[in-house]
Amino acid sequence: MSKFISAWKLSALLLVGTALPLHAQELTLLGGVTNSASFAKSSYAWQVDYRQDLFKYVAGSITYLNEGHLTGHHRDGNAWEVWGNVPFWNDRVALSLGAGAYYFYDTQPLPNGDTANVHGTAPIISFSATAYLNDRWFYRFMANRINPSTGIKVNTAAVGVGYWFGPNRRPLGTQPNRGAPEPEYVTEPQLTFFGGQSVVNTSFDEKAWAGALEYRQGLLPHLDATATYLYEGNPKVIRRSGVAVQLWPVNTFIDKSTSVGIGLGPYINIDNKHPAPTGTGVNLGRKNPAALAPLVTLTIARQLTDHWIARLIWDRVTSTYNRDADIFLFGVGYRWSP
């Protein structure tokens, strides 16, 4: 739980900064390779990177990184980094060096055929080179070095394409300001129904239909709160459902019609596949108490009309009994003025 709290602090420090007059928001999708530190093993890699300018030559980022399938390991996680940027050639090329913390989830097979979900935090050092094609689109190369104190040390390298989501088009050259400051925006009340799929992080990736009902309310500019009922379906190895309460640093783009955010909070759940025994006798019965699990969520939403929105959700449930799960949901919601 302490590692989860650390992850929340890192997220808050970065995204609560959106309340400052920040201008550059970049979203990048990259694909490439993962190599062990000795280059003896390799696999694929892919990542989604959200980067925000904090000052003229300093940026912060949140990244989802999937390291592929090295032998005995299926590791992914979230990285929080601070970047130093050096622009060249009339701001059309930028070299950046980043460093921060990587909170990972490593699915490992056990000799008895079961699976262990190992969690931990590791230092990450990154380098990126960016070529801006125009005032919205760019190419990016990114390399990462991950050095956990225990477990495998890896290098990843990936290339991808990104989009500038600033309130104005990205200016080139030596213009002092990168667009006008984003106007303050507080999310209106929203009620959203979701359907999708849950995937339990075991060696066999058991899947099931899943659903959720979410109430969302803006508390402050760039800060939402949600209360969610979450049903993870019945993927055979778990049958889990419960209620989550989360806080969300959020940001809006494109005339406030598109928003992204990251949510963190407790998930109070019951797993009917894992009841706990009570009493000391064999026939004294069993009960199934509620458990508390950290829930980390990424979202992107698009306003369809004045009242209707479409929203994508990616939940990561972190368990204490080797039953982590990813839940991918799509929903349609209704918003109204308070």
Image (cartoon, helix red, strand yellow):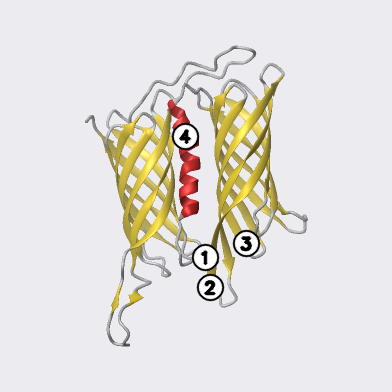
Dot 4 alpha-carbon crowd within 10 angstroms: few under 14, some 14 to 19, many 20 or more: many
Question: Separation of disc 3 and disc 4 at Cα?
Answer: 31 Å
Numbered disc 1: secondary structure: loop
- Compared to residue 251, the image places residue 38 above or below, namely below
For the residues bearing labels 1 and 2, Cβ distance under 8 angstroms: yes
For the residues bearing labels 3 and 4, Cβ distance under 8 angstroms: no
The picture places residue 287, in percent across and down from the top left corner, at 29, 74
Residue 183 quadrant:
top left
Question: Separation of disc 3 and disc 1 at Cα?
Answer: 11 Å
Q: Amino acid at mark 2?
A: Asp
Marked residue nearer the N-terminal end (3 or 2):
3
Q: Mark 3 highlights which residue?
A: 73
Q: Quadrant of the C terminus?
A: top left
Residue depicted at x 36% and y 46%: 246
Dot 2 alpha-carbon crowd within 10 angstroms: few under 14, some 14 to 19, many 20 or more: few
Dot 3 alpha-carbon crowd within 10 angstroms: few under 14, some 14 to 19, many 20 or more: many
Marked residue nearer the N-terminal end (1 or 4):
4
The picture places residue 155, in percent across and down from the top left corner, at 70, 49
Residue depicted at x 32% and y 85%: 280
The picture places residue 267, in percent across and down from the top left corner, at 36, 55
Q: Mark 2 highlights which residue?
A: 114
